[in-house]
Amino acid sequence: MIHRLLISLLSLIGLAGASMSKEQSPNMGRVFEMRTYYTHPGRMDALHARFRDHTCKLFEKHGITIVGFWKPLDKTKAEESMVYILAYPSREAADKSWDTFRVDPVWLKAKEASEKSGPIVKKAESVFLDSTDYSPIK
């Protein structure tokens, strides 16, 4: 439900136009990735801390541009899910960035340390998006 709601919201602000192809955006602009994370009970604070203290810096290191992070207004849902959007020059660049990010020793160490009290992410969803021709964000 939150996923559909955010896609509708992104349509209104010009980020929609889902493209599941691994090819370059037809508009020759950036491609966006909307990621939704669902956490294990009581682990949302740990997820926010991991992003705040480690992940955001590592995204930059690996050429991943952060567009923004959002949490549901509903308090219960905010304790179990988080949505963020990233941007890349192309789908191929996204794949390359994620490949190098996942094996980065700094990331592996931060992930391990943040999960000493148990796993954080229960489920992750990813949708690649292509901006529309009238979108103010390309």
Image: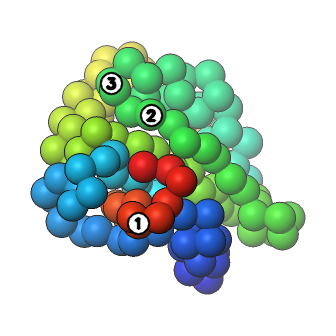
- Earlier sequence position, callout 1 versus callout 3: 3
**Image side of residue 100 versus residue 88, left or right:** left
Q: Residue at x 68, y 62 (%)?
A: 80
The residue singled out by tag 1 in the image is 132
Q: Amino acid at mark 3?
A: His
User: Nearer the viewer's eye, disc 2 or disc 3?
Assistant: 2
Distance from disc 2 to disc 3, alpha carbons, whole Å, reads 9 Å
- For image coordinates 47% across by 64% down, the residue present is 134
Q: Residues within 10 Å of mark 3 (few under 14, many from 20)?
A: some
Looking at the picture, tell me which residue is in the foreground, 69 or 81: 69
Q: Quadrant of residue 33?
A: bottom left
Kindly tell me whether residue 113 is visible in this rendering. no
Q: Secondary structure at mark 3?
A: loop
- Give the vertical position of 98 relative to 119 (above or below): above
Q: What residue is drawn where x is 62% and y is 63%?
A: 13
Secondary structure category for the residue under label 1: loop
User: In the figure, is residue 59 to the left or right of 117?
Assistant: left
The dot on residue 47 is none
Q: Is residue 43 above or below residue 3?
A: above
Residue 122: where, in percent of width, then height? 50, 60
Image coords of residue 100 (percent x, y): 23, 28
Residue depicted at x 63% and y 56%: 82
Amino acid of disc 2? Thr
| Residue 69 appears left or right of 19 | right
For disc 3, the marked residue is 62
Q: Secondary structure at mark 2?
A: strand
Q: Which residue is mark 2?
A: 65
Above/below status of 114 relative to 71: above
**For discs 1 and 3, the disc positioned in front in the rendered view:** 1
CB atoms at circles 2 and 3 under 8 Å apart?
Answer: no
Q: CA distance from mark 2 to mark 1?
A: 19 Å
* Res 78 → quadrant: bottom right
